[in-house]
Amino acid sequence: MAMMDDRPRQVVTVSLLTSRLDASAVLAAVADSTAGGNVLFVGTVRDVTDGQPTAALEYEAHEPLSRAVLERLGAEAASRFGLTATAVAHRLGRVEPGEASVMVAASSAHRREAFAAAEWLMERIKHDVPIWKCELRPDGGREWVHDGGPDGGGRS
Amino acid sequence: MNHPTPGPARLRVSLFAGMAATAGGRTWDFDWQGGTVGDLRRRLAAACPEIAALLGRSTIAIGDRYAGDGEPIPADAAVAIIPPVSGG
């Protein structure tokens, strides 16, 4: 996942993985000797959603479009906040409660920009990146989540 | 190289998440004589009224970018319906 090349600034790393996310690897992807502030956000799956028990979540993505959008967002965050590097890792497939579904890292010379960029990136990811989650219920029910609320057809 | 026999142009549309569940499939092939994203929306809604409500809240992507309703769609384009996202 590390992307070492001849571009010392504004490295953007994007990973879509069906295996467990690795916080150390995501942080390593933004590490740089010029960056004094390194922020890592970890989003984890909860076992309850709106009062309903969740057995697990299942994530699906339009992968080529997700990569393209995430790379654009990473580059925009880098220039908007003057970052050294950004990294986004998103889990796909079934994710159990307590496991990480998303990680966002930002590094900058100083901490404020890195904190602000990580929050900005998470907001954009939730609005712009074609990734969807399906709530898997303990009784075997499935509900795709669209726009913060389940949309009828996803039930089965 | 072998060239396929010319036939009516086809357009393959990819569906995801609740849209695929409602439509009962992940890809949908259409005869396509050309038209815009808006034209495709009307074709999809007419072919499968069950998806019309969610389609109305969806964005259409051509290749690796989102497209507006006025944009033309070439027959060889990779088109996807993007319902409201819920990643993170």
Image: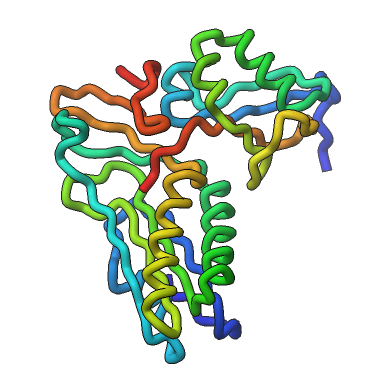
Q: Quadrant of residue A78?
A: bottom right
Give above or below for A50 relative to B40: below
Q: Residue at x 42, y 21 (%)?
A: B21
Q: Residue at x 31, y 63 (%)?
A: A41
**Can you give x and y, in whole percent of width and height, for residue A156 in the image?**
30, 17
Q: Residue at x 74, y 20 (%)?
A: B39
**Can you give x and y, in whole percent of width and height, for residue A102 in the image?**
33, 55
**Can you give x and y, in whole percent of width and height, for residue B44 in the image?**
63, 16
Give the side of residue B13 with respect to residue A97, left or right. Answer: right
- Residue in front for this viewpoint, A3 or A39: A39
Q: Quadrant of residue B87?
A: top left
Q: Residue at x 42, y 70 (%)?
A: A1
Residue projecting furthest to the bottom: A33
- Residue in front for this viewpoint, A138 or A79: A79
**Can you give x and y, in whole percent of width and height, for residue B49 in the image?**
55, 8
Image mark count: 0
- Residue in front for this viewpoint, B12 or B3: B12
Give the side of residue A156 with respect to residue A77, left or right. Answer: left
